[in-house]
Image (cartoon, rainbow, N blue to C red):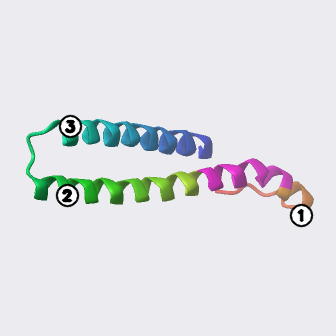
Amino acid sequence: MLDVLIRSTLDIVGRTELLIESTMRLLHGGGFDEIEIYELDCEIERLRNVLFAADEAIRSLACKAERLPQTAAEHGLHTTLH
């Protein structure tokens, strides 16, 4: 279950990064005034910051999940975690 969550979240991060790239190309292609460009650029930067934080969090979770069986064995945890 945890591996599905991790893979799905990383997929969302990847797709959003592609969306940001496409939006940046459209943004610099024309058709927007300077205020719209600035506002979109600010929103894209905020989205990048959120994606970076989400990416770091999910990778940290993945790393901890990989170590969970090892940690549980070392500390004598033999119950099922939900």
What stretch of residues is rendered in magenta?
59-70
Give me the residue at 29% from left, 35% from top. Answer: 22
Residue located beneath label 2 in the image: 38
- Residue 41 highlighted magenta (yes or no): no
Q: Are marks 2 and 3 in contact (CB under 8 Å)?
A: no
Query: Which of the two residues, 54 or 18, is positioned nearer the viewer here?
Result: 18
Query: Which of the two residues, 75 or 57, is positioned nearer the viewer here?
Result: 57
Instruction: Give the dominant element type of the magenta stretch: helix, strand or loop.
Output: helix
Q: Is residue 65 left or right of residue 37?
A: right
Q: Residues within 10 Å of mark 3 (few under 14, many from 20)?
A: few
- Measured in 3D between alpha carbons, the distance from the residue under mark 1 to the one under mark 2, in whole angstroms, is 53 Å
- Amino acid at circle 3: Leu
Q: Quadrant of the N terminus?
A: top right
| Sequence-first disc among 3 and 1 | 3
Q: Is residue 22 left or right of residue 15?
A: left
- Amino acid at circle 2: Tyr
Residue located beneath label 1 in the image: 75
